[in-house]
Image (tube, coloured by chain):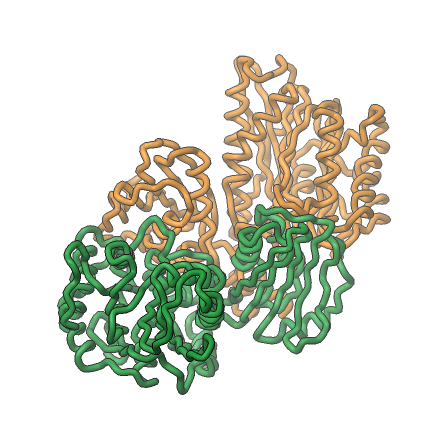
Chain colours: A green, B orange
Amino acid sequence: MARSFSTTVRLAASDKSRFVPTSGVYPKGFRVGGYYSGVKKRPELLDLAAIVSDTPAAASAVFTTNVFKAAPVQISKKVLDETHGEGINAIIINSGCANAVTGEGGLEDATTMVQLVDKTLNKTAPSGVLANTLVMSTGVIGQRLKMDKIEAGIPELLTKHLGSDHESWIRGAKAICTTDTFPKLVSKEFSIGSNTYRIAGLAKGAGMIHPNMATLLGFFVTDAAVEPAALKSILKYAADRSFNAISVDGDTSTNDTIAALANGAAGGPIIAEGSEGYEILRDAITSFAISLAQLVVRDGEGATKFITIKIEDAKTFEEAKKVASTIATSPLVKTAMFGKDANWGRILCATGYAGVEVDPTKTNVSFVPNDGSAELKLLVNGEPENVDEARASQLLDEEDVNIRVSLGTGGGHSTEFWTCDFSHEYVTINGDYRT
Amino acid sequence: MARSFSTTVRLAASDKSRFVPTSGVYPKGFRVGGYYSGVKKRPELLDLAAIVSDTPAAASAVFTTNVFKAAPVQISKKVLDETHGEGINAIIINSGCANAVTGEGGLEDATTMVQLVDKTLNKTAPSGVLANTLVMSTGVIGQRLKMDKIEAGIPELLTKHLGSDHESWIRGAKAICTTDTFPKLVSKEFSIGSNTYRIAGLAKGAGMIHPNMATLLGFFVTDAAVEPAALKSILKYAADRSFNAISVDGDTSTNDTIAALANGAAGGPIIAEGSEGYEILRDAITSFAISLAQLVVRDGEGATKFITIKIEDAKTFEEAKKVASTIATSPLVKTAMFGKDANWGRILCATGYAGVEVDPTKTNVSFVPNDGSAELKLLVNGEPENVDEARASQLLDEEDVNIRVSLGTGGGHSTEFWTCDFSHEYVTINGDYRT
């Protein structure tokens, strides 16, 4: 079958290049870059990335909830615990090997990586602290890292291939890609009072594919000065509304990690929980994280649609999230979107088995047009509408499809969730890769 | 794309005819049949089925947990509540229209169906009882039943088209099909002491497809004499290990229903909870229900594989079920099976995010051959094996694939679960049907 899909692949890839920025506004005091170390087979593919802060930065991260946590996840957790998220120098990331399910040896390899970064940067971790660097890996599960390549590559990358220009950021974004069809880079500027700050970040994703080129990885850095506890609470808040509100295929990998660094290079007061700028920073980081996370969905394996699911009037935020993710992971909803089928019954059905409070007699389902015109009502207070099939097809013909479901619980909580469709291409990528 | 898949469809369908029995052993005192009433568009497709017991039977049923319960589900629940599962005459089933999300009118239609069956059989329900008949529907969601067709069809079916021979059972099985590629009929004989009994049943399924030809429907009848409370507890036990242990696409429909009737026509003592024959009957019904449920997976939309997932050493039976169903619904596992890819990392990953207790250092994963030869170990106590790829491909080349996962919790609970793979055909059926 593969041949009959190759066209689709190329089209998808080229088409998506519009999501790659040609310039950006980058935070002060950070250097980033990508390098080919030899972990991946093809030299034209970068496989080692790093972000370095010129001054010690506050750091936080959210990690996969998978029971089988990869070695880099365990080591990065350890570093954050021991440093309390203070004085972090860098993040080192390799692609091509996930260093997951690799036992004790894998933990030693991840430790070597963070300590080699510290050493190359002439930093010494305080006693009782493993290192001042975080580490992420993505790629094959169950295989050891080629440490000779990594140990040669890290000094090369850190001493010769870091920069603060747009090209360096793009190279960093490329170096963490696996099956991604485009590098994912976002940068934004925001102000708190008279102070202007910048935030920039990279992500990779696209679902998991053989052999478990798994994983959602991402990090962002800002030149605002943020107190570690504040950065932690903001990252949690932002991740719940961005990276934890997207789904390509519902699988949670062994390596998923999102990290944040704040180095204060832009000056201004240190932002703490409850301090004046806290909520502005939280909202700026959240909207930034949503932009970055959406790129992962745009690049979903075989995706032909970008689907926004808005859940309204749920009992709680968590229940809204649960319904949204149930709809977003329903193969029937996802294949219907691929087939441009106004199959609201499937959306309703998924809502019904999400396991949260719903009032069937007050449930509403509709498609929301991108052009701001009136929504197409599908179900009103539990009763099906006579759907204008022509208008429905028109809306489902667009790349961006918006589904709104109101649960009628009176709770008033809402959330947004982003996913893509299930296409032949998804099956091809995940099943046929060998043929 | 449709054309390139048509071959697959035909092959799959014809190939699966081997699952249709050419004879059977049928319970005494039941008449069954199928008829074309006109609900479906194509006359060559039967759309109305009934099973009638010559004497009042004990009855029980398990229903969908979906919040949006279809009218026939609500009416059958009411009948069982009001009759306490005693004195049931018949089950009436239509295909082609699910009578779901149809509001008050839909409830009236389902009521008309059960009361018309009673009337045609000259049975009068006791006061305070809606009817002595159960009803099931499967097909389009959000459309009203063509009641003129149904009301003309029910007397025709009940008076002229019921029988107790194999052909009548096959016609009944065909009449409840929607997208099924073959009718699903199983019959078995079993003994308790010196008494011999028969059990036979029908099922339909194959996942949900446009426009929500939803639903797992099934029923089985036995000529054993069973006390209603005992039948209820046995059905729950059997369903947990059969119809609730299969997955095609993880979606739970608005109409899912499994019903059981026991009329005692074979004589013998009335079997009650705690009575001598209870466990023998429970085990006989459970193994019967597993055979019937497995046919639904065999006919999974686009299925090319029949996958048995055995979970061992879980903390509880429920946790074993949860891991099994998480693996069974992972699109990555299912596409890997389609691609004949020994992608144990995906199985491990799904195990890791199932949300149950797992000991990563004591987890074992393996493929179990069908020929009884030694299993192919993939992961041993959390450490990956050097997998013999040739043998792996050999095992994955077979239609039946067996996955064994031991969670190492020391709990010792195990379960079996059955699913199929995700193929291009699945996407075609569920997405491309319009093209």
At horizontal 51% and vertical 20% (from top left) the residue drawn is B279
Residue A312 x %, y %? 63, 58
Looking at this view, is A207 or A202 the one in front? A202
At horizontal 38% and vertical 34% (from top left) the residue drawn is B315
Write down the quadrant of residue B264 in the picture: top right
Residue A179 in sight from this viewpoint:
no
Residue B220 in sight from this viewpoint:
yes
Looking at this view, is B354 or B187 the one in front? B354
State left or right for residue B180 relative to residue A166.
Answer: right
State left or right for residue A354 relative to residue A259.
Answer: right
At horizontal 19% and vertical 57% (from top left) the residue drawn is A129
Establish if A333 lies above or below B58: below
**Total numbered labels placed on residues in the image:** 0
Residue B224 x %, y %? 62, 21
State left or right for residue A97 relative to residue B117.
Answer: left
Write down the quadrant of residue A3 in the picture: bottom left
Looking at this view, is A403 or B414 the one in front? A403
| Quarter of the figure with the C terminus of chain B | bottom right
| Quarter of the figure with the N terminus of chain B | bottom right
Looking at this view, is B309 or A248 the one in front? A248
Residue B226 x %, y %? 63, 20
At horizontal 59% and vertical 67% (from top left) the residue drawn is A339
Establish if A175 lies above or below B131: below
Residue B333 x %, y %? 41, 54
State left or right for residue A129 relative to residue A26.
Answer: left
Establish if B287 lies above or below A349: above
